[in-house]
Every structure is written in structure tokens, then in C-alpha cells.
Image: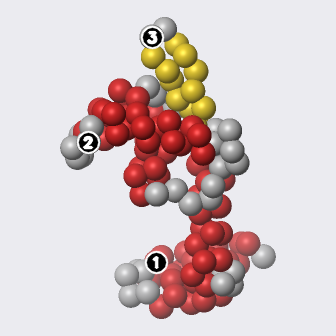
Amino acid sequence: MRKAQATLTDQELTIMKLVWRLGTPTVRDVYEALRATRQIAYTTVMTMMNILETKGYLKKDKQARAYRYRPARPEQAVVTSMVREFVNRVFNGASRPLLLHLAKDRRLTARERDELVQLIKEAD
């Protein structure tokens, strides 16, 4: 098994979010959860989960006739890695431009801006 990569594709992240929420799902469990919102083939879900296992994001255990998958890394660790990779790639590793972008974003409410300021203060 190779070391987990920081960035997940959109589809991989969607599957990981389901695994974190469901705990130890089977491929069928993830497939059914995905089918509630979109059409997807069972074999696609199985392939994606096998890829996530190969990448080091999932572990699987044989139980009865099916494999149960579980996260190999906590959600917060994966999100932190993805954010760090994004900041490195888009902002050359500097957090300040990201914070400025967020602070100036018109989609943020006044309350969200206040929360952002408070979070920065608490981080000190």
C-alpha cells in the first residue's frame, strides 16, 4: 500500500464523506447512498473504493460474504492535507492571500466574517 495522497478527486471525496458518515459500509451501502442523489454503476463504486484502498484512504475487512470498508485516515487529517495542498498550489504556500480572498468574498455574511476574525484571534 502506498502513502495516501493529499488531494482526492471529486468522486473520491464524495465516497470518503459517505464512508466517514457510515462508519464501516460495504460497497453496496455506498452505492445505495450515492444512487439516492445520482445514477452510478455498482462496478464504478467498487472500482473507486478499491482505488481509495490502494491510495491508502480505505482499509477493508472481510465479513461474511462482503468486505466492509473503514477510513484509514480521519476526516480532519484528510481535509487538512487537502487545504494545505490547495494553499501551496494556488497561493504558493502563503495563507494570507487565501484569508484576504475569504474576507473580501461577498458570499460571506457579516456573521461569518465575525466568526473568521474570532477564529484567527483564538488561533493566537
* Mark 1 closeness class: few <14, some 14–19, many ≥20 residues within 10 Å: few
Instruction: List x then y, in percent, for residue 93.
Output: 69, 80
Residue at 63% of width from left, 55% of height from top?
A: 5
Q: Position of residue 72 (x, y in %)?
A: 64, 38
- Pick the residue in front: 124 or 64: 64
Which image quarter: residue 39?
A: top left
Q: Earlier in the sequence, mark 3 or mark 2?
A: 2
Under tag 2, what secondary structure?
Answer: loop
**Closer to the camera, 97 or 115?**
97
- The mark nearer the N terminus, 1 or 2, is 2
User: The residue under label 3 is which amino acid type?
Assistant: Arg
Q: Which mark is residue 63?
A: none
Query: Which amino acid, mark 1?
Result: Arg
Three-letter amino acid code at disc 2? Ile
Q: Would you call the spot at circle 2 few (<14 residues within 10 Å), some (14-19), or many (20 or more)? A: few
Residue placed at 46% from the left, 33% from the top? 22
Q: Which residue is mark 1?
A: 111
Determine whether 113 is above or below 77 in the image.
below
Q: Which mark is residue 40?
A: 2
Element at label 3 = loop
- How far apart in space, not on screen, are marks 1 and 2 (Cα)? 38 Å
Marks 1 and 3, how far apart in space? Answer: 50 Å
| Count of number-bearing discs | 3
Numbered disc 1: secondary structure = helix
Q: Are marks 1 and 3 in contact (CB under 8 Å)?
A: no
Tags 1 and 2 in contact by the CB under 8 Å rule? no
Any part of residue 19 in sight: no
Q: Is residue 84 left or right of residue 106?
A: right
Where residue 24 appears, as percent x and y from the top left, is 51, 28
> Which residue corresponds to mark 3?
65
